[in-house]
Amino acid sequence: MTTEIPQSGLAMRTLITAAGALELSLVDQPVTPPGPDEVLVRIEAAPINPSDLGLLFGPADVSGAELGGTPERPVLTARVPERLMPAVRGRIDQSLPVGNEGAGVVIAAGENAQALVGRTVAVLGRAMYAQYFTARAADVLVLPEGATAAEGASCFVNPLTALAMVETMRDEGHTALVHTAAASNLGQMLNRICLQDGVDLVNIVRKPEQAELLRSQGANHVVDSSAPGFLADLTAALEETGATIAFDAIGGGRLVGQILSCMEAAAVRKMPVYSRYGSDTFKQVYIYGGLDTGPTEFNRGFGFAWAIGGFLLTPFLMKTGPARAQALRERVAAELKTTFASRYTGELTLAEALQPQNVAAYNAKHTGEKYLVTPNRGL
Amino acid sequence: MTTEIPQSGLAMRTLITAAGALELSLVDQPVTPPGPDEVLVRIEAAPINPSDLGLLFGPADVSGAELGGTPERPVLTARVPERLMPAVRGRIDQSLPVGNEGAGVVIAAGENAQALVGRTVAVLGRAMYAQYFTARAADVLVLPEGATAAEGASCFVNPLTALAMVETMRDEGHTALVHTAAASNLGQMLNRICLQDGVDLVNIVRKPEQAELLRSQGANHVVDSSAPGFLADLTAALEETGATIAFDAIGGGRLVGQILSCMEAAAVRKMPVYSRYGSDTFKQVYIYGGLDTGPTEFNRGFGFAWAIGGFLLTPFLMKTGPARAQALRERVAAELKTTFASRYTGELTLAEALQPQNVAAYNAKHTGEKYLVTPNRGL
């Protein structure tokens, strides 16, 4: 079996130098042979999620990115504005692997994991923009027979985040939820989960065609923040569903505060007497993304029973415990081609992923657009 | 005993009409004779807390307030800007009593509360800008012999809020705390509590003289947000104390986000390896006041382990339960002249409290300034 193991493979790296240069490059790195409980995966597909972009580019000004190096070993460089350097102090001069998740074929395995050889598996490994990855066998998710690596590439981040939202809603005593940028891949997935589980979901989108898309997928409550009646529409949907928790992918701007204000307005309509302190209905918004990297701004006209916080998958999984996390993963595998199906806008080789015009496309974060890196194609 | 009970007494009322007029007035209202378990209190002193101002004036433009009525029954009127009317929809055309807390002498009592006659007591009653108040005997706090009504007037809101902050810090697993507008009456009280209890407190003030005041009262960590090195000073104090929870009286502006960013910077300094998601140190800011009524604005450069929320005394007391709440009240009574002493800038009769120049003074919310209404003086 040792004969199957390649000596080395290409891997993408991101580096920010002390002088403020961002460098994305491809390096040859030695392949780690699998230990007794490990598998070696040839990675066939890895999505570019919004959560990858933060590490890939940091706060660099990508609009001025330039391509250097050679066609086989391209290097993309861009500048990090000096005022933003303090935000990346912790990563200065470290060449970091990137790519949170992906899927591929097990091409070698240690003695306790031989049954996995030849299977297509999904991996959450934080270094998936690479040709090979050595993982603990216990950490990979074996895809159902017939599922391709592309179908399984986005098994973890979006599906588990969407499931974590519904679980968090229940854990924290809410009965319905709100989601923003709701026409995203994750949003469409969340809509399917909620329809299947009978949970009321208020989808907030930013364009009429996104509202149409979600309605065509059976969504019952869709409000368009670009419509003139947005706040009234949102308040009505919140009153109807009783949703008092929201998950926000946008982060910047005024939407977080508007959601809390509309939740409060819906709660106040149900109050028998006026209170100067507002309603005692607890209202929660979790920010899990930063599609708008500008500041978050809100007026505090929603009483005192409210919270805004950060939301991230890993701490949720830590808190929820291994048994429940495993149950969620198994649901993802079982419903991979239905509830948790992802759509991709295009595929990029490792080298193509460094081309400035491709960077501009996938870094634009258009709702519903997602690209797939295919590390073992075209090299 | 019935002979001691007056027929009626003056009381302040606040009203916002559907047409957008704010009216503060004095009304004669009948005195409610005490039931078997009740006491009738002649109110001698009631503070004007920031939490009273919101109900007193709503969103009215007080700078243009005009005095009408008669010298004995003055009426202060001001306009509520039309765009702000939705925020007060719940109180339209309701004449509301005002004054969260106060103290006075029990002048009559029901058969089961006779022991209280003649005692000076503090009351949390939401209608304390009035000559008389009928309370359940179980709800009043009997002041120690020798304590005056002025000394006991602020027994509840500030002392219990300051104690609630320290309790919340402990309940939520933090070991040190941050307070803003820290030279306020409440802030000075919190500083005394923390010194006594051995809890590290980072005091944030807005002027050098406020820093001096707190240092003269033994404060160990004082940072001045008007100083050029503010963010570095704050980060150093946070690193030294390990404070990861803050209570903010200001609300608007950028301070809330700056506190979270400095907490994150202090946490990151202790991290062995870089994480794109920031530290996993959970950082909490509670907003309990609105000295700056403008929008809250923050960049989200502090990872994902953070929360901002509203904080209010009453829900805390509900959550903490009656036994613990009673223990806190007893501590306040026992340390009334030391830890929980309040200082007042001036005293106002009910009629004086409606004079525009006095309104301008107490509505300015200058840190450390506080006024006392004396409903049974000068009428």
Image (cartoon, coloured by chain):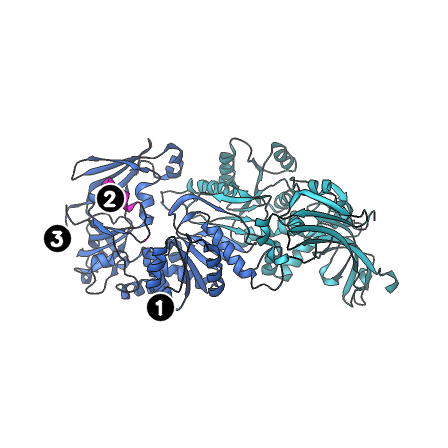
Chain colours: A blue, B cyan
Q: Earlier in the sequence, mark 2 or mark 1?
A: 1
Q: Residue A138: which quarter of the image?
A: bottom left
Task: Report helix, strand or loop for mark 2.
Answer: helix
Q: Which stretch appears magenta? A: A353-367
Front-most of A212 and A128? A212
**What amino acid is labelled 3 in the image?**
Glu
**Chain hosting mark 1:** A
Q: Which residue bears the numbered disc 3?
A: A4
Q: Is residue B158 visible?
A: no
x, y percent for residue B102:
73, 52
**Chain hosting mark 3:** A
x, y percent for residue A272:
61, 64
Residue lying furthest left: A3
Q: Is residue B15 visible?
A: yes
Residue lying furthest right: B3
Q: Earlier in the sequence, mark 1 or mark 3?
A: 3
Q: Which residue bears the numbered disc 1?
A: A196
Q: Is residue B354 above or below residue B211?
A: below
Q: Which residue bears the numbered disc 2?
A: A358
